[in-house]
Image (cartoon, helix red, strand yellow):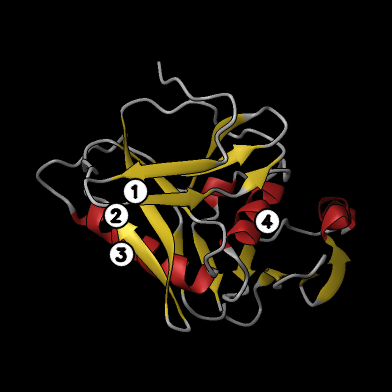
Amino acid sequence: MMKYFSLIFIILLFSCEEKKDVLLPKANVSIVKDVQDHSPIYIFFKTEGKDTIADVNRNNSIISTNWIFNIDKRLPLRLVILQVIKLQEKKRGEKAHKNEKAENYYSYADSIGKNLAFLPFTKVYYKIEKPKEGSFVFHFKKGSDLVLMNEKEVKKSDLVESFYKIKFERTPKVILLFDKNMSYQEYLQNKILLRNFAVYNVEEMPKEFIF
């Protein structure tokens, strides 16, 4: 069984020449507490002059294992997702050593349980564009406590209740749209919020739009 320190808010990667750290996002709940047979993927926050760079290290990743994405919370979503897409395509395109049961997880720190936790996203396909008109969209904006729910502003804390108050003839397919300029920390917290929708398994929302 995997063993973690009781407080893991910073993941350290040591090499023969340097030490790097990933500042993990925080949330107040553990979606998944333990992942067996895993390989780490690191996406570091790096600056070069005025530019911010998502610096990827996947040297120890094995295609047939579960992949844990340890991503620095300070990175903007637009940079993170480009790297995540590349890695997803790499794993999905592998034929020789493919393991259909292997999952992908984002790691984060549960600030209440004081443990490392994980959020699965294996089935998600990211689109760097706006969704088509006519879709029922949850639009999460950068740094805002409000969500556009099909063009109506509601508080994040009221999103679940507001959705269930609507009398649908047929429950719509919800499309998720995230502001590309929000931080990875904010993105992950929004994803965890969406787990509160009882009629939806977030893993069954196969497309997420980043724009």
Q: Whole-Å distance between the Cαs marked 3 and 4?
A: 22 Å
Q: Which percent across, then down, holds residue 77?
A: 53, 68
**Please, is residue 182 above or below residue 191 in the view?**
below
Viewed as shown, does residue 118 lie left or right of 123?
right
Q: Residue at x 81, y 51 (%)?
A: 160
Badge 2 element: strand
> Which numbered disc covers residue 166?
none
Q: Residue at label 3? A: 86
Identify which residue, 66 or 196, lies in the foreground. 66
Badge 4 element: helix
Is mark 1 in CB contact (under 8 Å) with mark 2? Answer: yes
Q: Which percent across, then down, holds residue 163?
A: 82, 57
Q: In terms of sequence position, does the residue under pointer 3 or pointer 4 come before the other?
A: 3
Badge 1 element: strand
Q: Residue at x 39, y 70 (%)?
A: 82
Question: Three-letter amino acid code at disc 1?
Answer: Ile
Q: In terms of sequence position, does the residue under pointer 1 or pointer 4 come before the other?
A: 1
Q: Report which quarter residue 33 is drawn in.
A: top right
Q: Residues within 10 Å of mark 3 (few under 14, many from 20)?
A: few
**Please, is residue 157 above or below residue 51 in the view?**
above
Q: Which percent across, then down, holds residue 16?
A: 21, 46
Q: In terms of sequence position, does the residue under pointer 1 or pointer 2 come before the other?
A: 1
Q: Whole-Å distance between the Cαs marked 4 and 2?
A: 25 Å
Q: Residue at label 1? A: 41
Is mark 1 in CB contact (under 8 Å) with mark 4? Answer: no
Q: Residue at label 4? A: 190
Is mark 3 in CB contact (under 8 Å) with mark 1? Answer: no
Viewed as shown, does residue 84 lie left or right of 181?
left
Q: Residue at label 2? A: 57
Q: In terms of sequence position, does the residue under pointer 4 or pointer 2 come before the other?
A: 2
Mark 4 or 2: in front is 2
Q: In terms of sequence position, does the residue under pointer 2 or pointer 3 come before the other?
A: 2
